[in-house]
Image (cartoon, rainbow, N blue to C red):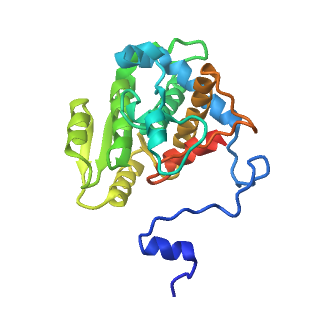
Amino acid sequence: MLNPDPVLSDLRQARETFWLNPKLTPITEADYGHPLTAAMIDDAEARLRRFAPFIRACFPETEAAGGLIESELTPTPAMQQAMPCPIPGRMFLKRDADLPIAGSVKARGGIYEVLKHTEDLAQAAGILTPDSDYSVLRDHRDFFRQYKMQVGSTGNLGMSIGIMSAAIGYQAIVHMSADARQWKKDLLRSHGVTVYEYEGDYSAAVKEGRALSDADPKSYFVDDENSVDLFLGYAVAAGRTKAQLDAMGIPVDREHPLFVYIPCGVGGAPGGVTFGMK
């Protein structure tokens, strides 16, 4: 028997639906049952800054940002005026679709997870120390070539994982579903990434990719739905956005609330961004 809840009924009928969570709780009171903290997001931000010299050296498009992978916060007054309902205050677009290297929000979490794993391997091998200039990694491609980095993707996450992994020196492998765009497959291959194509959907590509990776002790699989590192990489967006608002002289407090609207796919990217914002 179908659940009679009116919200679910509307969804089943493909009617436009707006739902407010009746159990919404302030983050200071919520019990999420997980160990994630604001300090872990700060740690992710610090790691990205350590890698900035390497990113800057490998990807000239990040030169202006000093090797940080960041997007502009753009005022959109025309869009605000065109909205069917009046929206007070000011409206901005966080242009993560223009993030360098991968060209989507997945550049945040995906690239961060690759860098986190790279740091772990390099520190264990004595290639990096706490005082290292991380651009030295460019001289150690042969070391990373013995390892594989794999992911299942419809396109955007695969772009971020594949391009950064190949730049570091990994054997980069992206498992893509049938609905992935051909130009994304072609671009990945142009960077030296191996692309496996599957007739099934995204879930099939993830299942096959994980199985192949698990069978290889020198392979690392990026799990879009369960990865803490991926989640924390996305969450870094919040502090970056706050800094941009501060630079514009725009306060965010009880008298000046910030409302964030995020398009959502599987949920990893918007979940991480939302956690950081909260």
- Report x, y in % for residue 159: 33, 37
Of all residues, the one furthest to the right in this rendering is 29
- Vertical position of residue 11 compared to residue 161: above or below: below
Q: With respect to residue 238, does 36 lie above or below?
A: below
**What residue is at 47 percent from the left and 70 percent from the top?**
11
Q: 28 or 175, which lies in front?
A: 28
80 or 100, nearer to the observer: 80
Residue 198 shown left or right of residue 273 in the figure: left
Residue 64 at x, y = what percent? 43, 13
Q: Position of residue 226 (x, y in %)?
A: 52, 51
Residue 238 placement (x, y as % from top left): 60, 34
Q: Is residue 139 visible?
A: no
Q: Quadrant of the C terminus?
A: top right
Rendered residue at 44%/43% (across/down): 82
> In this view, which residue lies farthest toward the bottom?
1
How many labels were placed on the picture? 0
Q: Of residues 227 and 91, which is closer to you in this image?
A: 91
Res. 239 image quadrant:
top right
Residue 64 or residue 82, whichever sits in front: 82
160 over 154 or under it: above or below: above
Please report the residue visible at 50 percent of the width from the left and 45 percent of the height from the top. 269
- Specify whether residue 211 is in view: yes
Does 31 sit above or below residue 137? below
Q: Is residue 97 left or right of residue 195?
A: right
Picture residue at 54% right of the left edge, 30% below the top:
120
Report the side of 115 relative to 278 (left or right): left
The answer to whether 55 appears left or right of 237 in the picture is left
